[in-house]
Image: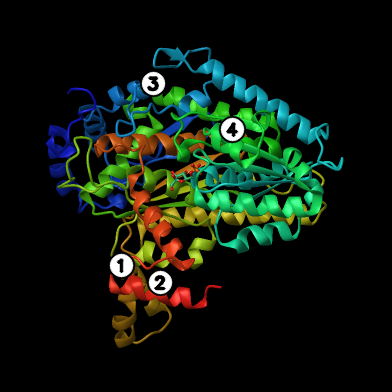
Amino acid sequence: MRGLDMPRPTDTAAWNELSKHADAIRGVQLRELFAKDPARAQRLVLHHDDLRVDLSKHRATDETLRLLTTLAEQCGVPAMRDRMFAGEPINDTEGRAVLHVALRNRSARPIVVDGEDVMPDVREVLDRMRAFADEVRSGALRGAKGDRITDVVNIGIGGSDLGPLMVCEALSPYWIGGPIRPHFVSNVDPAHLARTLHDLRPETTLFVVASKTFTTQETIANAKAARAWLVSALGEVAVRSHFVAVSTNHAKVGEFGIARERTFGFWDWVGGRYSLWSAIGMPIALAIGFEHFEALLAGAHGIDEHFRTAPLERNVPVVLAMLGVWYAAFFDAETFAVLPYSQALHRMPAWLQQGDMESNGKSVDRQSKRIEGYTTGPIVWGEPGTNGQHAFYQLLHQGTRLVPVDFLAPLEPEWPRPGTPEPLASMLRDQHTLLLANMIAQAEALMVGKSLEAVTRELEAQGLSKDAIDRLAPHKVFEGNRPSTTMTFRRLDPRTLGALLAIYEHRIFVQGVIWNVNSFDQWGVELGKQLAKTIEGELRGGPSQPHDASTAALVAEARSVIR
Ligand SMILES: O=P(O)(O)OC[C@H]1O[C@](O)(CO)[C@@H](O)[C@@H]1O
């Protein structure tokens, strides 16, 4: 192996063995595995702090897990992981290190890029974030007219939106009733900004313009409109007290009119979709307070240490990643569903979609060759339970496709909070019990299913005729044998959330290594951006450009109504 030339997974001995093993196991029912070996319910469980990761409902035996671990070794996962932590430029198409782990490094260990420890700079930005967040939250730092800041609007998109938005939603008990309400505007659709501003007052609103590049069309358009809204109410002079920027591009921030002391930087070794741990997390720190933001970092750091040091077969992100590879490679699984039984985590699937699909949605490998013979990143999707049950679980249970799922749930309810009066408090507790019952039942139903015999017996007991039973029974059969991971934890606090998110980040990393792709570039987003610029010019009355007939017709139609 030289440089970043990792082996193609299909060239390894382990892949070959796994392929044979998959043929042998395909007909095996999970029910049978449990009947033969009830101890798998204890043995196939991983723990990290209070996080319990139940892998026993996977179509996997000890031998499967052993072979998957061997595949991880043969594909060079440990070597690549160590290169990432060592600050090597493993994002080789952009010549960059990949160091979101440095952002949450709570140890004294230096992390070196190009011969320089990056930790002093990381700590300096964190200190500035702490000071700023504390001042805004305490009311020491006020708006242009002397009002307290009560609302923070983050303007950003993709990684400059999804991470902080998802975390703020997940940790709402830490800001509801507090000094700062967070809001997020991402879409270039003017409705997003206009609706958000509708209920806000310029005097009490702080804008955080978050953009790594500070050139992203949507963000700059929204930031300019927000600026106009503020200036029309409070005058140009108010911009300096009501705008801050988070970016790596200080020159562009300056052009926009945000001062250096109101700019929080980060570095090109932080990928957008991995950036919530950087100053991109500013709205989180403002909303929940810096000490809770630090707890989030600490939770993620705990997983970084686990990922770095735990043996592969007990390594939570590694094992989860390898099970994903298993289903994609040998069970034709095209998608992967994340189903949090927690309304607080309702934006987690959206965050993970970017993290996973922008990272591993690639068809060219690290040797610049078209990938043949295996598939890469799955389509990631999900909704919180129990909403999903009433929408798409039909397909999970009875569809023709295999969809591996992750169930996630806090065992303790987020509500009631202290002070919630009775009987509401006990009713809310009761609802949480219902929520958990549903999650556990769904995992059981997916695995156990319901046989034709059981359905027939039920219908007979209801007095249906033989004809009616023959017609109806097949529709009511659940094949079962559908795999799931169940992750439970005590409560959704910042530390646990940090750990959970870091698990998913490293899961993406490991899968990228196995599939031999660079998980840290995103060239696939460029073409659409480029074409949109051309079409924007045409829609604004510029000369027509050559297009296919369908595109030309759409441009003409849009032009006819745009004023
Ligand atoms: O933070 P920026 O530079 O505005 O980019 C926003 C998002 O746009 C992307 O480049 C994709 O278009 C993402 O990778 C990134 O998170």
Q: Residue at x 51, y 41 (%)?
A: 488
Real-space Cα separation, disc 2 to disc 4, in angstroms: 39 Å
Please rate how many residues cluster around mark 2, counting C-alpha atoms within 10 Å: few if below 14, some from 14 to 19, many from 20: some
Name the secondary structure under disc 1. Answer: loop
Which label sits on residue 547? 1
Please rate how many residues cluster around mark 3, counting C-alpha atoms within 10 Å: few if below 14, some from 14 to 19, many from 20: many
Disc 4 marks a residue whose amino acid type is: Ala
Disc 2 marks a residue whose amino acid type is: Val
Q: Nearer the viewer, mark 1 or mark 3?
A: 1
Sequence-wise, which precedes: disc 1 or disc 3?
3
Sequence-wise, which precedes: disc 2 or disc 4?
4
User: In this rendering, does residue 39 appear at all?
Assistant: no
Sequence-wise, which precedes: disc 4 or disc 3?
3
Name the secondary structure under disc 3. Answer: loop
**147 over 331 or under it: above or below:** above
Q: Residue at x 65, y 22 (%)?
A: 127
CB at disc 1 and ligand 1 closer than 8 Å: no
Q: Which residue is mark 4?
A: 279
In depth, the one of 238 and 191 nearer the eye is 238
Q: Residue at x 45, y 62 (%)?
A: 536
Q: Which residue is mark 2?
A: 555
Q: Residue 170: image x %, image y %?
A: 61, 45
Q: Residue at x 21, y 30 (%)?
A: 6
Please rate how many residues cluster around mark 4, counting C-alpha atoms within 10 Å: few if below 14, some from 14 to 19, many from 20: many
Q: Which image quarter: residue 481?
A: bottom left
Sequence-wise, which precedes: disc 1 or disc 2?
1
Residue 160 falls left or right of residue 84 = right
In depth, the one of 90 and 396 nearer the eye is 90
